[in-house]
Amino acid sequence: DTGVSQDPRHKITKRGQNVTFRCDPISEHNRLYWYRQTLGQGPEFLTYFQNEAQLEKSRLLSDRFSAERPKGSFSTLEIQRTEQGDSAMYLCASSPSRGLPFAGELFFGEGSRLTVL
Amino acid sequence: DAKTTQPNSMESNEEEPVHLPCNHSTISGTDYIHWYRQLPSQGPEYVIHGLTSNVNNRMASLAIAEDRKSSTLILHRATLRDAAVYYCIGGGADGLTFGKGTHLIIQP
């Protein structure tokens, strides 16, 4: 399968623990995006990378959240000191590097569902 | 990003055309209009996008009003597999803002 891959698909953790999600984009895609989706809501933009550079961060991305894409390929999203409000689906998307960053098709993974107890 | 307004839900019959409306009155001149859909427990799937002209692809057609304040996604012949939440997004360079979308129900 050559689509966007996310791992783990499900994560249950206790409040205060740290969690890390990994996203492997489609191989020729230079752009990578993280979104968060809570039940009954649409996805909310968190951050965006062009290769290894993090070019955009939403105000939603608090200090407890950090994202990296060290070699311009896979990306990780870490949440430190998790809170119950962090429970959500974390979605990764990628796109080829053509034109404006949000002007074309984004390819989404199936997401990583986080439950904070 | 432009704020978009969509009906919460719509219902249609299988094999009939479906017209999903979206208002985006605050859209800027350079913001594309995107449509995605999402099935339960899956990530969003791209449907179509456009800037000013009407657009067609294998999945759907996008009709954009001349003033760009609204658009309509057209599914020419709905199937049961088209039942999903459809998001209309006015996206700029600072991220795509998905609203709550329209829950499309297809009756057999």
Image: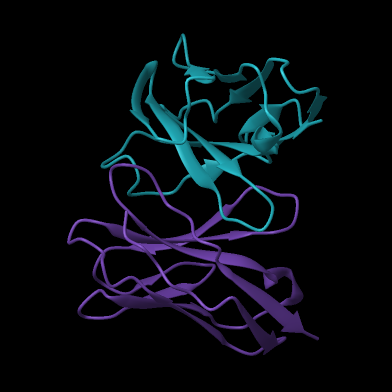
Q: Is residue A60 toward the left or the right of residue B16 in the image?
A: left
Which quarter shows the C terminus of chain B? bottom right
Residue A9 image offset from top left, x and y in percent: 76, 32
Residue lying at 65% horizontally and 47% vertically, measured from the top left: A38
Q: Which chain is cyan?
A: A
* Image position of A88 with respect to A18: above or below: below
Residue A113 image offset from top left, x and y in percent: 73, 36
Q: Specify the color scheme.
A: by chain
Residue lying at 29% horizontally and 49% vertically, measured from the top left: B92
- The image quadrant that residue A18 belongs to is top right
Residue lying at 44% horizontally and 75% vertically, measured from the top left: B61
* Image position of B90 with respect to A3: above or below: below
Q: Please state the total of marks drawn on the protein image.
A: 0
State the hue of chain B: purple
Residue B55 image offset from top left, x and y in percent: 36, 70
Residue lying at 43% horizontally and 31% vertically, measured from the top left: A47
* Image position of B102 with respect to B36: above or below: below
Residue closest to the eye, B33 or B78: B33
Residue closest to the eye, B8 or A24: B8
Residue closest to the eye, A15 or A28: A15
- The image quadrant that residue A20 belongs to is top right
Q: Residue furthest left?
A: B29
Residue closest to the eye, B68 or B100: B100
Residue B34 image offset from top left, x and y in percent: 41, 60
